[in-house]
Image (tube, grey):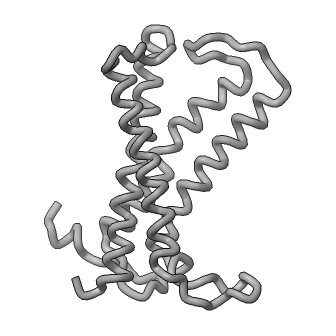
Amino acid sequence: MSTNMLHRAVESKGTGQPVPLWAERVAHLIPLVGLPVCLWRLPIGFGYAMGGENTPSAWWHIPYVFGLSLLTEAFALLGFGLVRRWGEVVPNWVPKLGGRRIPPFAAIVPATIGGLLLLGLMVNWFFTAFRINGSPGFPYAPGWDTLAMTVSGLLTLWGPLVLALTYGYYRRRCRPDA
């Protein structure tokens, strides 16, 4: 892929400055890296241990697992705010605030904190997956542990992707000439 194509801007979608193509692609990638873990959780909610330890069934497991998966994807979709107009200007349907410009750091600070917290998950995953410093590894049966490591490993990409997207937002909103 040529550098030209990577830095080409996509249609503005109402943003103040054109969004780089790489940022648009990263915004679409973030919900996808969380999806495998969400799908992995679903059988666990129905009592299938997925190679892990069987736990007693409870009425709240299914709504908890579905709710956690929906919440995960909802937070992942917030990354689109860093490449869309609604991340720069409050949507008109919001009472009293609609149409107001969002200060860049009102998006940059929470996105950076979230990205750094998710980066902490990556470090924890790395220590667990490779059994560093006496980590016991994933608590799953052989074969299942590889699958668990793979789907959770994809989720750990969320942090660096959010941080990259936040940097792109910062450059576009705070340093448009750079």
When asked about the image quadrant of residue 97, the answer is bottom right
Of 41 and 170, nearer the camera is 170
Provide residue 117's location: percent of width, then percent of height. 46, 48
- Count of marks overlaid on the render: 0
Provide residue 56's location: percent of width, then percent of height. 77, 13
Residue 151 against residue 166 in the figure, above or below: above
Horizontal arrangement in the rendering, residue 117 relative to residue 133 (left or right): right
Residue 129 against residue 158 in the figure, above or below: above
Q: Residue at x 71, y 14 (%)?
A: 55
Residue 176 against residue 147 in the figure, above or below: below
- In the picture, which quadrant includes the C terminus? bottom left
Q: Residue at x 67, y 87 (%)?
A: 98
Q: Residue furthest left?
A: 2
Q: Residue at x 57, y 14 (%)?
A: 52
Horizontal arrangement in the rendering, residue 73 relative to residue 30 (left or right): right
Provide residue 27's location: percent of width, then percent of height. 43, 62
When asked about the image quadrant of residue 155, the answer is top left
- In the picture, which quadrant includes the N terminus? bottom left
Of 69 and 97, nearer the camera is 97
Of 87 and 115, nearer the camera is 115
Q: Residue furthest right?
A: 59
Q: Residue furthest front?
A: 133
Q: Residue furthest top?
A: 142
Provide residue 62's location: percent of width, then percent of height. 77, 31
Horizontal arrangement in the rendering, residue 98 relative to residue 153 (left or right): right
Q: Residue at x 36, y 77 (%)?
A: 19
Of 119 and 99, nearer the camera is 119
